[in-house]
Image (tube, rainbow, N blue to C red):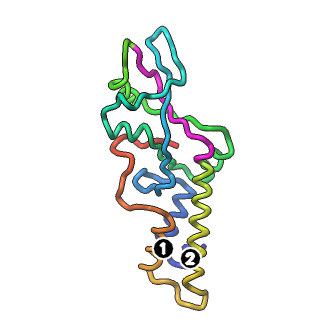
Amino acid sequence: MLASQLRSEELANWVSQELDGYKSTEELPDYRVVSTGCFGTWTNGYWIVKGRGVPLSKVRDEKLKKFLTTFAVRDGIRTVEQHAAGSDSRFGLSADITSCVNHYVSEEGYVYAEIQYAIGRHEFAQILDTVRNRLLDFVLKLDENWSAEDNPPSKDELSNLVSVVTGQRRGSSRLGDFPSQSG
C-alpha cells in the first residue's frame, strides 16, 4: 500500500520480489547472498566418504570457487521463513558443476558423486531480520523527512531512499557466469 501511495515502482518491485522471489541472481540484494561452503559424497566406486568438504585450494577457476562459496537465496519470503523455522538446509549442485569440481579435485580414482551447499537456518533468519529492518528503516526515514501534509518526496529522492534501504545494485552479478542456484 505504501508503494502505491508513494507511486514508487521501485519500492513496489522490491516488495513484490521479496514476497514472490527473485527471478535472477543479478536482481538480488546483498543480504540474500550467503557465504557458505560445500561438501559431498566422495567415492571411487567401491569406498564412499560422506560429508567430505570440497577442497577449494585445489580449484583454480576463480569463478567456480566463488560459486562454491556463495549461495543465492532467490525464494520468496514465505519459503525463507520455512527454512529459518526448520533445520539446517542442504541444496544440491547440478551434475555439470559437480563435474567441473571433479576436474580439479579428483585424486587416485576418487571423485564427488554429489555436492551440496550447507546453509544454516540462522542464515535464513538473518535474511528475514534484514528485510524487516530495512522496511522499518525506510518507513522511519520517510516519516523523518516528509509529513503527511507535505507533498510526497520527489521521484529522485524516493528512488535514492529505496535503493539505499533495499540494498539493490543494478547490473552487478556477484555469482559469476555459472547456472543459477535454487534456494
Tell me which amino acid carries mark 2: Lys
Residue at the limit of the structure toward the bottom, as seen here: 149
**Is residue 56 placed above or below 172 in the rendered structure?**
above
**Is residue 52 placed above or below 6 in the rendered structure?**
above
Residue at the limit of the structure toward the right, as seen here: 85
The percent position of residue 42, horizontal first and vertical second, equals: 47, 19
- Residue at coordinates 51% horizontally, 69% vertically from top-left? 11
- Residue at coordinates 56% horizontally, 72% vertically from top-left? 138
- Residue at coordinates 54% horizontally, 36% vertically from top-left? 118
Q: Nearer the viewer, residue 179 or 49?
A: 49
Q: Which residues are magenta?
A: 110-123
- Secondary structure mostly taken by the magenta-highlighted segment of the chain: strand
Q: Residues within 10 Å of mark 2 (few under 14, many from 20)?
A: few
Tell me which amino acid carries mark 1: Leu
Q: Residues within 10 Å of mark 1 (few under 14, many from 20)?
A: some
Determine which of the numbered discs, if any, sits on residue 177 in the image: none
Q: Nearer the viewer, residue 69 or 131?
A: 69
Residue 168 horizontal side relative to residue 144, left or right: left
Residue that carries the numbered disc 1 in the rendered image: 161
Q: Is 100 contained in the magenta span?
A: no
Residue at the limit of the structure toward the left, as seen here: 61
Q: Are marks 2 and 1 in contact (CB under 8 Å)?
A: yes
Residue 59 horizontal side relative to residue 15, left or right: left
Residue 130 horizontal side relative to residue 111, left or right: right
Q: Quadrant of residue 179?
A: top left
The percent position of residue 171, horizontal first and vertical second, equals: 35, 58
Residue that carries the numbered disc 2 in the rendered image: 141
Q: Secondary structure at mark 1?
A: helix
